[in-house]
Amino acid sequence: MGGYGSGRWYRWDSKSTTESLHRIDIRWLKEQGYLRPGAAGSLSWSSRGEQTGLIDYRMGLNRMVLNYCHRPHGGEWEGVEQAISFDQTPCNYGGFRTWFLCPRCGKRVAVLYGAGKYFFCRHCYDLAYASQQEDEATRLIRKARRIRKRLGVSDDLMEPILLKPKNMHWATFHRLRREAEQAGSLGRIVAAQRFGLEIF
């Protein structure tokens, strides 16, 4: 049985984010070959070189069973066994995609989160993505940098975008460059207004 439980896996902010929690992604499990019936092992998480979570799992025909320890705030450690069922949907070009069925609401989901005693989907735990809690300036600047990365240039918003990436259409290049420049400029203006500064 795993040693670290979900009682230490998160901090409550104004609203916990998916990035701050331990998660189990069924796509990753499939890539690792862990979904085959009879497979068993441990899943662990770490932060800055220190282990922050450990659970044991075993795979059945259409489900996964987790075993781990959980400690409520200030309480005693308790053993938890949780069964999570799978579902499948056909892909457009053949084969099937496997999903978790959230043990609480029954929705098909790819990721479950350890925000409490059990692993449930982000909707059941009312979790936000970190990007949903960003202020407008941060969101705009992040958008600009994401586009600049796609264009193969530095994330320095003051550096001009001059060269078109190989194999990119000119129309796409001009559109992306315009979007990056607009998002970067507006992000700097919003940030400056928040701190009472002026941009010339």
Image (spheres, helix red, strand yellow):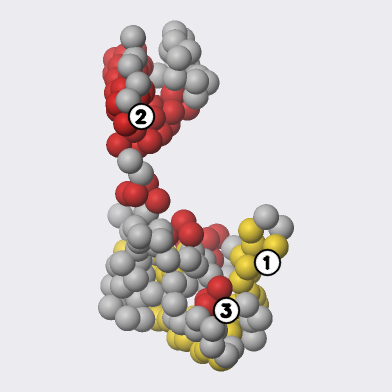
Q: Amino acid at mark 1?
A: Gln
Between 56 and 68, the one lying in front of the other is 68
Q: Are marks 3 and 2 in contact (CB under 8 Å)?
A: no
Dot 2 falls on a residue whose secondary structure is loop
Mark 1 or mark 3, which has the lower sequence index? 3
The mark found on residue 51 in the picture is 1
Where is residue 4 shown, x and y percent of the image? 62, 77
Left or right of 138 on screen, residue 65: right
The mark found on residue 195 in the picture is 2
Callout 2: few (<14), some (14-19), or many (20+) C-alpha neighbours within 10 Å? few
129 w.r.t. 105: above or below: above
Q: Amino acid at mark 2?
A: Phe
Where is residue 12 shown, x and y percent of the image? 42, 66
Callout 3: few (<14), some (14-19), or many (20+) C-alpha neighbours within 10 Å? many
Q: Quadrant of the C terminus?
A: top left
Residue depicted at 70% across the width and 62% down the height: 50
**Residue lying furthest front in this view?**
196
Q: Where is mark 3, residue-wise?
A: 5
Real-space CA distance between mark 1 and mark 3, rounded to the nearest whole angstrom: 11 Å
Where is residue 144 shown, x and y percent of the image? 38, 27
Between 178 and 99, the one lying in front of the other is 178
Residue depicted at 34% across the width and 15% down the height: 199
Between 164 and 96, the one lying in front of the other is 164
Q: Is residue 27 visible?
A: yes
Real-space CA distance between mark 3 and mark 2, rounded to the nearest whole angstrom: 42 Å
Dot 1 falls on a residue whose secondary structure is strand
130 w.r.t. 107: above or below: above
- Quarter of the view holding residue 176: top left
Residue depicted at 44% across the width and 72% down the height: 115
159 w.r.t. 90: above or below: above
Mark 3 or mark 2, which has the lower sequence index? 3
